Image: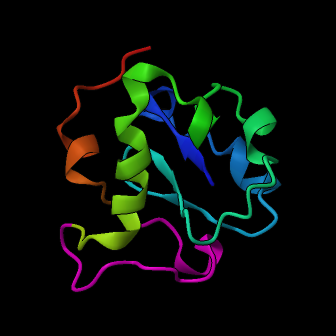
Amino acid sequence: MTYVIGKECLDVAEKSCVQECPVDCIYEGARTMYINPEECVDCGACKPACRVDAIHWEGDLPEDELQFLDDNAAFFQQILPGRDAPLGTPGGADALGRIGVDTPMIAAMPANCS
């Protein structure tokens, strides 16, 4: 089981969750953040830290956000635009820094103006 970042983070990337993650498994794309499901230890420290309520335990994802579960995993399993290989499980977001690209699903979403 893992935590998932949903639509509330789109174009916000507030990052309060990053400081609370004990395993450094929250990565930054261009328009949103992604939790690596292989590195997440399911501690839940990120959820209350998120000021925009974008983080959900995968079993509690709202019905209209279920696609974010697969999309969060795709960020690490698929080859992202401009990259030669999938990110996989790099062992921590801090060492990589901002990735700066998103999955095709996120890239195609309209701008979040809220």
In the image, residue 16 sits, relative to residue 41, either above or below, namely above
Residue nearest the viewer, comparing 102 with 61: 61
- In the rendered image, the residue lying farthest to the top is 114
Type of secondary structure dominating the magenta stretch: loop
In the image, residue 90 sits, relative to residue 107, either above or below, namely below
The residue at 80%/34% (across/down) is 48
In the image, residue 19 sits, relative to residue 49, either above or below, namely below
- Quarter of the image where one finds residue 16: top right
Does 86 lie within the magenta span?
yes
Residue nearest the viewer, comparing 93 with 74: 74
What colour scheme does the image use? rainbow
Disc count in the image? 0
Residue nearest the viewer, comparing 4 with 97: 4
Q: Which residues are magenta?
A: 81-100
Image position, residue 46 (x, y; %): 75, 46
Residue 22 as seen in the image, left or right of residue 56: right
Image position, residue 83 (x, y; %): 23, 78
The residue at 31%/79% (across/down) is 86
Residue nearest the viewer, comparing 31 with 57: 57
- Quarter of the image where one finds residue 66: top left
The residue at 54%/64% (across/down) is 36
Image position, residue 104 (x, y; %): 19, 50
Residue 12 as seen in the image, left or right of residue 64: right
Q: Which quadrant, please, contains the C terminus?
A: top left
- Quarter of the image where one finds residue 19: bottom right
The residue at 37%/16% (across/down) is 113
The answer, for residue 100, to whether it is visible in the render is no
The answer, for residue 64, to whether it is visible in the render is yes
